[in-house]
Image: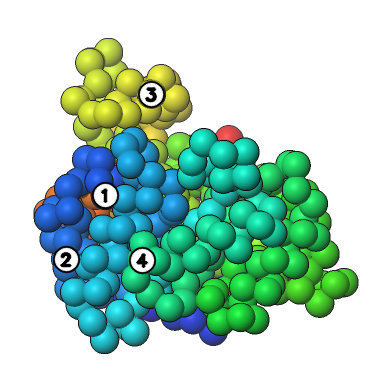
Amino acid sequence: MKVRPLGRTGLRVSPICLGTMQFGWTADQETAFSLLDEAVELGCNFIDTADIYPAQGEKGLSEKILGRWLARIGRRRDDLIVATKVRGPMGEGANRQGLSRRRLMMAVRESLERLQIETIDLYQVHWPDEETPLEETLGALTDLVRSGMVRYLGCSNFPAWLLTRSLWISDVRNLCRFETLQPHYNLAHRAEFERELLPLCLDQGIGVLPYSPLAGGFLTGKYRPGAAPPPSARAGRNLARYGNERGFTIVQTLQEIAAARGATPAQVALAWLLASPVVSAAVIGANHPDQLRETAAGADLVLDPIELEKLSRASAW
């Protein structure tokens, strides 16, 4: 895979970032190790997790599984960019969640222990904490960077006004700033990001790392109008969210372009996303290596302007 700049950080990352939310849930440790090995074989150097993963089950287990794999590969870890996230509840105590200084100082040590590494390359705020001042959060995160426990900072699920305010606070107080944004963004879910966040990220050099780039599998073409959803832990929710006239028009357009290019709808959907100049990498998950290999091929597919326009028109908001 051809690497891309991660915002303005100077890091170079693969256009595919392997997401690990399923590690310990729909992918056991053996499968997770196979997925990680396959990702590296494909040229992926970017792995994303979170302290609250997996989506169901023991919190922190995804980081533990990733940490065991990192310990197994030894010095090759130096070639990888490891990202994790903080914010969600990690226990019953009132101070076991959020973005306070106390929580951040505790959470980063816990993540480093589970990951079995000395430094987190990209430490991301999973979603905002309305009860903690941004100044406190950014001040604590800056201390983590200056201490060497964290290299760069990012955020996820931030609206444009809050990301703008965060950047302003970092500027006027000489604090480290958020260099990346992880938004919910795909062909079927465009407006939330494109309305205000896209121009903001372009202007400020923020590296964008869309999650759910295939709309939870809806853009793979396995959903059919009027048919029962496929067997999946999230199928019913995906169908309720995207299974409308617009959604199926998008899928039909993906299928037409895929057939003409000898590709799959998932590969075309990923290629559309990666064609954006603001996107550094797409965060994709998989439950087995074959699935990862097939989807990741979309990173090498270059759509022409006519194909991009067809997709943008079919998915217009």
Mark 2 to mark 1 CA distance (whole Å): 15 Å
**How far from the left and from the top, in percent, is residue 222?**
22, 32
Q: Earlier in the sequence, mark 3 or mark 4?
A: 4
Mark 2 or mark 1, earlier in chain = 1
| Marks 2 and 4, how far apart at CA | 19 Å
Of the image marks 3 and 2, the number of the one nearer the N terminus: 2
On residue 23, the disc is 1
From the image, state whether disc 1 or disc 4 is nearer to you.
Answer: 4
Instruction: Examine the image and state in which quarter residue 191 appears.
Output: top right
Left or right: 116 in relation to 278: left
Instruction: Locate residue 131, reporting x and y percent.
Output: 75, 42
Task: Name the residue located 34 percent from the left edge and 71 percent from the top edge.
Answer: 116
Identity of the residue furthest to the front in this view: 93
Q: CA distance from mark 3 to mark 4?
A: 31 Å
Q: Residues within 10 Å of mark 4 (few under 14, many from 20)?
A: many
Residue type, mark 1 in image = Phe
Q: Dot 4: what SS?
A: helix
Say which mark, if any, is on residue 115: 4
